[in-house]
Amino acid sequence: MSSLLNGTLSLSTIFTIIWVVVALIVLLIIIRNSIVVVNGRQIAIIERRWFGKKMPSGQVVARNSEVGVRAKTLGPGLHFLIPFLYVTNKSGFVEIAEDEVGLVEAIDGESLPPDRIFAKVISGHNSFQDAEAFLNNGGQKGPQIEYLTPGQYRINPVLFRVNKINSLHIPKGKIGIVTAMDGLPIDSGRLLAKSVEGHKSFQDGETFLAAGGQKGPQINIMFPGTYRVNTSLFVVAVADALIVPSEKVGLVTALDGKELPPNEYVAASVCEHDNFQNASAFLNAGGQRGPQLEVLRPGTYYINPYMFSVQLHNVAKVERGEVAVIVSNVGREPDQTEMGTEAGKPEVQLLPGIERYVVPQGYRGIQREVVGPGIYYLNPLAFIPYVVNTTNITIDWNDNDKDTKFNSLQVTSKDGFLIMVSVKVIIRVRPDQAPYMVAKIGSVENLIDHVIHPMIDSSFRNQASSTKAMSFLQDRQEEQKKAELHARQELTDYHVECVSVLICQIQLPQELMETQTMRIIAEQRKEMYKEQQLAEQTRIATEKSRAEADQQKNLMQAEIGVKIAEQEKLSSIKKAEGAKESRKLTAEGEAAGIKAIGDAEAQKILAIGNSTAEAYRKQCEAISPENVTVIEVFKRISDSNIKIVPDILVQGQEGGMGMLTAYISTLMDKKSGATEIVAPVMDEKK
């Protein structure tokens, strides 16, 4: 020190210092390589570099004194190792989140048996954190059945590869269809693996395999929820749950189960399968393969589609005024002895030796009891509903209405005219007769097409061919009654009631209608004239009545006057009778005097008449009777002061008539005061 202080060092001293420093450095290096500090979230992976055996080919992790990476790891803390013999590499913890699952694959270990895909489960390795225990206990190389749940793990990444995946979440309205990648073979004749207990919805793969779980599609499914499943062992396909909407029905077909008997259409019902959601219970109860009798009503169902196929169909709806006739394809075969006379009578011959019956409930065939209005969830493979309208059904034959099914009937009359007839037929099927109608003809549509239409067409053709066109039109009501009677008789055989047959319109040829129209117009005019005449007569009677009414006062007065006159007449008669007797006596006296006077006067007149007659006779002899007549006539005229000739008369006529005329003129002149008369010149020969 003194020499150092003095600033001078010896060579030996320098070398000593160098060796001390080197020794310290080496010591520090040794200390550094022998001490390992591991943080709180780390592990240290140990590797032996020297002085050991060489690992066998294919081995990854060294055992005992072998050179290589050791299975054991160092956790957080201070650790001492033999320097230069061991080296360490640090790695973080394996952290599995809350919504994750850690799938583990061992890189080293015993080899898997040839028939296995996943390593067997061993104990004691503390979720793969004790790698030495895993290897010492016979842990196998390859995918591990066990998985890591959420948390932090000190796992040797050289021995174990951890694949973090999300937890399996099946939302509402979904299902998980599971396929196991390992396990026993599926039983011969089965489509799906049998169900085993205790695997907690496939979350416990160890229990699944230990209980004899089978490889392949699983009969059990996973319901909505969150699951920690080893998806390397179980492949889960998320699919939609089955939703049966309102007014629909689900028809189920089992794809596995016992064989369906050859004479059955649908499988027999089994219990406790929870609407086919528990496929294992279905098989255990003896469920049969094929269409199922039971149906699914509206709702949501978690059904394994690998086990059950479901098809949606409409529900059977029966409205007001309707009934449904049910044809059952299931039940006991009808026996005539058990059925009785009425039900045992065959209604329809379908095929040789095969008959259809109207049967009571529980038998195969047409059910005698119908169902009324409502919604029915029927299996159409087992029960076929035929809806029958029990209200009045109207069938039209009309060209003018586009909604009608049939055109107007074309018939030919007896006299060869083509007639178009529009007809309306009203029928009704009683509810108690509906099964027998279905057995007879099948449906109302068949009844209309194959019975009523040809029957009505034939009926009107026959009626028209036996009568003239105009008579057919005029006897419309009678023809309607005939058609209705015929239809009622025919439809009785089909258990259908004919309410009425109506002739809506009869259309004759135009030329025939024109002739008929002219005749009717003539008749109508004739009737009009009669009515007018009757109206005039009525008017006259009315006027007469009105006049009598107007003169009623006068009539009453006249009537009273008549009565008064009658009384006065009686009074006058009495007075006259008295006066008569008085005058009679007086007249008798006077008559005697008058008689005498009369006799004298008569003699006087007779004498005058005789002399006058003689005078006329003489005149006639002298001038002829005709002239005497003329003279007398003009005397009468002159006595009446009538002027009939002019004051001057010029006459060119000769003979006696001229003299007569001159004489008459003279008389007239005297009477009228004429001053000059020119008489004709008399012919000397005359």
Image (cartoon, grey):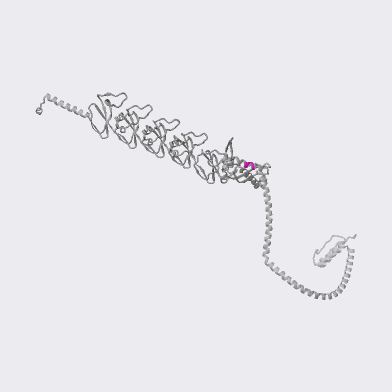
Q: Quadrant of the N terminus?
A: top left
Tell me: residue 130, above or below residue 552.
Answer: above
Viewer-nearest residue: 656 or 166: 166
Q: Is residue 444 visible?
A: no
Q: Is residue 490 visible?
A: yes
Say if the magenta span includes residue 458.
yes
Q: Quadrant of residue 569?
A: bottom right
Viewer-nearest residue: 300 or 629: 300
Tell me: residue 250, above or below residue 636.
Answer: above
Q: Position of residue 184 (x, y in %)?
A: 40, 30
Viewer-nearest residue: 651 or 194: 194
Is 638 left, or right, of 141 in this rendering? right
Q: Position of residue 112 (x, y in %)?
A: 35, 27
Say if the magenta span includes residue 464.
no
Is 165 left, or right, of 44 in this rendering? right
Prevailing secondary structure of the magenta residues:
helix
Q: Quadrant of the C terminus?
A: bottom right
Question: Over which residues does the magenta segment extend?
Answer: 455-459
Q: Quadrant of residue 395?
A: top right
Q: Extreme front residue here? A: 337
